[in-house]
């Protein structure tokens, strides 16, 4: 049972002091579910007839309010969505119409409907301790539909409203701090947290004596602002998600509509959006990465090895990124080995420069910087590896080389040491086959850029034991990654799907489709980046290498690509046949291929559920929330049903499909 | 080096709450309560540059949990004082804040500090008396103290036994007077001047803790007569004639007299002298008698020179033994003119500064009075008395 949020009223002299409280500590967000709105209705009834000089509304310690209860959203009907919006409009409208001034005292996290409640107050105080103030709705395929799109531009003008309602959510759901909220003019007073409620009451008494004067919002540049904003949205979602466009229309309308008109437009729009596929997929994706991933069903339950020292074999680009991440998150001794001293020295210099950069940014003080830098060492032999508890290899992607590294390591490390590989496409089972202890070998597959991409594929090879799995899973979480469990198979999950997609795309290129056309086709799906740009980032050589490995395993579905091979050699893509594909065809082919590959992943038991594939694509490839990773979209559009006679949501490993 | 004179600049307290889940401070941390009074004190005395504070001395009887971590330092940092200001924690049970003041006075008199912030806090809801204490079995095995010495209510019953002339009726009458005087004090200025309202989070959401939860304006002798005697069957000590278990915090500024002049402060009283005394642990309530006698003797004064007494009232009988021992009429207007702990509560280590703040206020009201005394008894058989001179009156 989720805790119920209540609006609790006490009299403090001439003032009403209202607390938004669900009776739990700050780890349990206060949501505005149906019962919360009933409580707000009762509160307003009490306030409306009373003779207060002012009211202060604040949250339980460290939390203001998290807004609507998202668990009420899945499979919601149009009518129900409109009713939900209307309930908020009516209640918040009554709050706004109270005969005395009201102050929202924003003491902690304030999201979505929490922000809207605050906007319906006469004024706002905000604590310098606030780290999470945002309208995340657009990030979830929605928009603030309890008056947010109408009141924010009226308060601070269209430019800030666009930034807070549209731009920030599209930038990985960026949030505002208390001081930013005050700087933008959304809050009227920035207060220290230590006596926040007391000082908010003082502010309320000042407000009761003397109304605030605020500058009128500036709409003079509106036309330019909205044109630029729409272009920016195009660049991000390429027309594939309606929410940001709807939000912009509503914000724009606020200039001329009455508030009531604006509310009514919000209701119409939310009735369309909330039951719609993008919003529903976003809510599904949000649940995956914010809830399921944090308590993943496959999380091993055995006790992991206690890691006190980490070895990294290989000192190339990927290895350096990984070693830096280990250093920053684990603050443990790290020893690096490569065959050439020069490469080792460069790697150490890179890592230390990264630490120095953090010191320069003020994230670490100098002493901490010196300490971290002192933890890294490197050599060309295995001296210093004997007492490692975890060694990760990130040498060149060649099976024999990796086997040799593990064989050498086995001579040096203790019996308990876990051996992990960051291979992206080689068989880990083969890699471990000739070892005395193959059971301690496990895959730990990071995504580029390592510091930013939250996914970690934890790969179980044929002999991998639970302790090895638990150890890399635990370390992964300490590195603040969100792991998925994958059974050893070529390309694991994310690279296998991306490579299959790449193969379809290259096929279009090889048939004479202009690269721009292919890019447009893929982006029209809402993919974050044009395939040609992505290919340059990954490097055509790496991409072709992965394709070759996938071809070795599944030659029929992963034919070699002459175009990609040519690019890998630094040439121009080869065109084998002049029969260009249309955009629609490319989209069809891509989705069919992706669906087919996911179906096979499930059929082969590489992952347990389609949800793992989606988590992988969301967190490892940056696929958009509004496609729900991808299987939600494939289910919504009936593609999975048509291809396999069942939805991905209904498929599980081992189940007859 | 010449000893420097020490003055009391200003003192404040939180409202005092009932200890336990029903009390208003149940969900509030003890150190946050201390932080609140410290910040209010800083706000009220803007002439004092925070970096001039030479030490922050905080008293608590239970020095664990939200009263652990070397309170003086912890509170200084949490209150936003500069990192250059040091602090420490101190314990003499009920005389905690009082001892924080004498320790601070010592630092000032010795020239180690110009200004000291002293106070006390006790969240008896979070830290019931004796909760984390491991009594040495020798106390009992070797009969070093009577077993009743560790239960304060029992020591109060012992006082009735030792001083049979003090009856339960006397105690109840004193308690009624305490409630009446406190009730009057809440409608005149003293509480407005010394009590800091604080917003606290509770089951009912945020609310303002601004009034003592033990104040009972309608207390009558008849009602008191019917109360239970929890410490012994047929006893005389009841919840009505003793102070309840209390949550509260206090803080005050002390300064060298010369520093006060330099900063343009208007100190309210000057510390004349102080004394601590030891008595039988099972009769701890008599402790203030020898302490009072000693401090007067050393100052070359008599009881008649003292115009105001602020004594703690853990038990009515305890104050009555002091009256008996020193020959003061319990109804004397000089004694606890604003009521006492029976009507406001006694958060152990915090109480001392409440007494001082009220004495300072009383001095302001009574320029004719030159000397005043703050005193209290201390568990395990001690007493404390501080003698003050009315600074504002400039005698």
Image (cartoon, coloured by chain):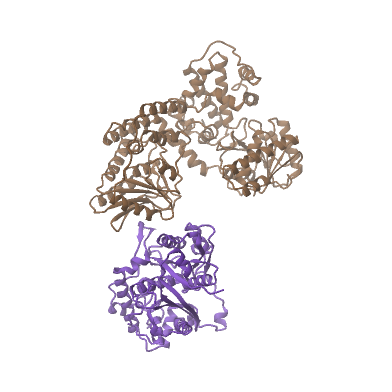
Chain colours: A brown, B purple
Residue A433: x, y in percent? 71, 36
Relative to A284, say whether B59 is above or below.
below
> Nearest the camera: A301 or B284?
B284
Furthest residue to the top?
Answer: A578
* Residue drawn at point x = 53 percent, y = 42 percent: A296
Does the rendering let one see residue B313?
Answer: no
Where residue A504 sits, quadrant-wise, is: top right
Whether residue A187 sits left or right of residue A547 in the image: it is left
Furthest residue to the front?
Answer: B262
Q: How many marks?
A: 0
Furthest residue to the left?
Answer: A49
* Residue drawn at point x = 38 percent, y = 35 percent: A161
Relative to B322, say whether A9 is above or below.
above
> Nearest the camera: A237 or A549?
A237
Residue A73: x, y in percent? 38, 38
Residue A414: x, y in percent? 73, 47
Residue A24: x, y in percent? 42, 53
> Nearest the camera: B229 or A346?
A346
Whether residue B240 sits left or right of residue A504 in the image: it is left
> Nearest the camera: A189 or B82?
B82
Does the rendering let one see residue B81?
Answer: yes
């Amino acid at each position: 049972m989720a805790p119920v949020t209540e609006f609790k009223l006490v009299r403090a002299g001439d003032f009403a002091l209202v607390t938004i409280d669900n009776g739990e500590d700050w780890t349990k967000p206060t949501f505005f579910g149906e019962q919360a709105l009933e409580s707000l209705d009762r509160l307003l009834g009490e306030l409306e007839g009373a003779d207060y000089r002012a009211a202060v509304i604040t949250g339980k310690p460290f939390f203001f309010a998290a807004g609507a209860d998202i668990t009420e959203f899945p499979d919601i009907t149009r009518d129900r969505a409109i009713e939900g919006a209307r309930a908020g409009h009516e209640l918040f409208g009554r709050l706004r119409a109270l005969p005395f001034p009201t102050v929202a005292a924003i003491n902690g996290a304030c999201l979505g409907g929490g922000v809207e409640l605050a906007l319906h107050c006469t004024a706002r105080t905000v604590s310098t301790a606030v780290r999470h103030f945002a309208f995340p709705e657009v990030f979830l395929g929605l928009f603030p539909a309890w008056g947010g799109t109408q009141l924010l531009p009226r308060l601070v003008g269209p430019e800030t409203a666009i930034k807070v309602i549209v731009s920030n959510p599209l930038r990985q759901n960026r949030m505002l701090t208390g001081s930013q909220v005050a700087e933008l003019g959304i809050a009227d007073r920035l207060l220290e947290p230590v006596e926040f409620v007391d000082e908010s009451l003082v502010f309320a008494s000042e407000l009761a004596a003397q109304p605030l004067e605020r500058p009128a919002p500036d709409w003079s540049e509106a036309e330019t602002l909205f044109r630029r904003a729409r272009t920016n949205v195009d660049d991000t979602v390429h027309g594939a998600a309606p929410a940001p466009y709807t939000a912009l229309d509503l914000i724009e309308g606020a200039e001329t509509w009455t508030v009531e008109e604006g509310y009514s437009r919000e209701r119409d729009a939310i009735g369309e959006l909330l039951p719609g596929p993008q919003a529903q997929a976003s809510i599904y994706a949000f649940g995956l990465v914010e809830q399921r991933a944090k308590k993943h069903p496959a999380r091993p339950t055995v006790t992991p090895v206690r890691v006190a020292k980490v070895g990294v074999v290989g000192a190339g680009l990927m290895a350096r990124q990984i070693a830096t991440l280990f250093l920053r998150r684990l603050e443990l001794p790290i020893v690096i080995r490569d065959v050439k001293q020069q490469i080792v020295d460069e790697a150490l210099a890179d890592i230390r420069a990264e630490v120095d950069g953090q010191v320069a940014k003020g994230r670490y003080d100098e002493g901490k910087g010196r300490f971290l830098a002192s933890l890294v060492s490197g050599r060309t032999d295995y001296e210093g590896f004997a007492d490692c508890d975890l060694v990760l290899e990130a040498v060149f992607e060649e099976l024999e080389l990796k086997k040799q590294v593990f064989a050498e390591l086995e001579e040096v490390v203790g019996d308990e040491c876990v051996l992990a590989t960051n291979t992206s496409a080689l068989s880990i089972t083969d890699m471990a086959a000739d070892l005395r202890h193959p059971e301690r070998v496990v895959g730990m597959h990071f995504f580029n850029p390592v510091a930013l991409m939250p996914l970690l594929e934890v790969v179980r090879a044929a002999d991998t034991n639970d302790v090895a799995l638990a150890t890399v899973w635990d370390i992964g979480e300490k590195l603040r990654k969100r792991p998925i469990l994958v059974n050893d198979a070529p390309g694991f999950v994310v690279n296998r799907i991306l490579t299959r997609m790449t193969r379809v795309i290259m096929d279009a290129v090889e048939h004479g489709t202009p690269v721009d056309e292919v890019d447009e086709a893929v982006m029209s799906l809402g993919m974050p980046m044009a395939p040609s740009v992505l290919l340059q980032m990954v490097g055509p050589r790496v991409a072709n290498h992965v394709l070759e490995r996938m071809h070795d395993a599944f030659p029929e579905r992963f034919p070699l690509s002459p175009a990609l091979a040519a690019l890998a050699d630094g040439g121009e893509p080869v065109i084998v046949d002049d029969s260009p594909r249309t955009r629609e065809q490319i989209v069809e082919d891509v989705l069919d291929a992706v669906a087919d590959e996911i179906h096979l992943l499930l059929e082969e038991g590489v992952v347990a559920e389609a949800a793992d594939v989606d988590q992988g694509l969301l967190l490892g490839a940056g696929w958009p929330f509004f496609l729900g990773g991808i299987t939600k979209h494939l289910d919504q559009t009936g593609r999975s049903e048509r291809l396999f006679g069942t939805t991905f949501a209904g498929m599980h490993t081992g189940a007859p499909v | 080096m010449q000893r420097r004179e020490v003055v009391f600049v200003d003192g404040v307290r939180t409202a005092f709450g009932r200890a336990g889940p029903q009390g208003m401070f149940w969900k509030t941390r003890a150190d946050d309560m201390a932080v609140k009074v410290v910040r209010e004190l800083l706000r009220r005395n803007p002439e004092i540059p925070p970096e001039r504070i030479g030490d922050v001395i905080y008293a608590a009887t239970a020095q664990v949990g939200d009263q652990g971590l070397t309170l003086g330092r912890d509170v200084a940092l949490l209150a936003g004082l500069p990192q250059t200001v040091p602090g420490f924690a101190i314990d003499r049970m009920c005389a905690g804040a009082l001892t924080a003041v004498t320790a601070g006075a010592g630092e000032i008199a010795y020239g180690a500090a110009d200004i000291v912030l002293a106070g006390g806090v006790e969240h008896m809801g979070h830290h019931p008396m004796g909760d984390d204490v491991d009594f040495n079995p020798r106390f009992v095995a070797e009969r070093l103290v009577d077993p009743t010495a560790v239960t304060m209510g029992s020591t109060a019953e012992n006082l009735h036994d030792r001083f049979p002339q003090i009856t339960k009726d006397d105690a109840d009458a004193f308690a009624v007077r305490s409630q009446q005087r406190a009730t009057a004090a809440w409608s005149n200025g003293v509480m407005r001047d010394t009590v800091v309202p604080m917003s606290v989070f509770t089951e009912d959401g945020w609310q303002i803790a601004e009034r003592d939860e033990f104040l009972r304006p309608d207390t009558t002798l008849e009602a008191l007569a019917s109360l239970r005697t929890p410490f012994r069957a047929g006893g005389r000590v009841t919840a009505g004639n003793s102070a309840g278990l209390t949550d509260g915090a206090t803080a005050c500024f002390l300064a060298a007299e010369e520093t006060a002049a330099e900063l343009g402060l208007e100190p309210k009283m000057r510390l004349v002298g102080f004394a601590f005394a030891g008595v039988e642990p099972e009769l701890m309530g008599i402790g203030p008698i020898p302490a009072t006698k000693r401090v007067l003797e050393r100052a070359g004064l008599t009881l008649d020179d003292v115009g105001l007494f602020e004594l703690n009232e853990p038990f009515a009988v305890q104050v009555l033994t002091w009256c008996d021992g020193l020959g003061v009429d319990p109804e004397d207007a000089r004694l606890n003119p604003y009521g006492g702990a029976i009507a406001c509560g006694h958060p152990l280590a915090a109480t001392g500064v409440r007494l001082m703040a009220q004495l300072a206020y009383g001095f302001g009201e009574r320029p004719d009075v030159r000397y005043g005394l703050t005193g209290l008894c201390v568990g395990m058989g001690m007493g404390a008395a501080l003698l003050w001179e009315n600074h504002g009156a400039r005698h």
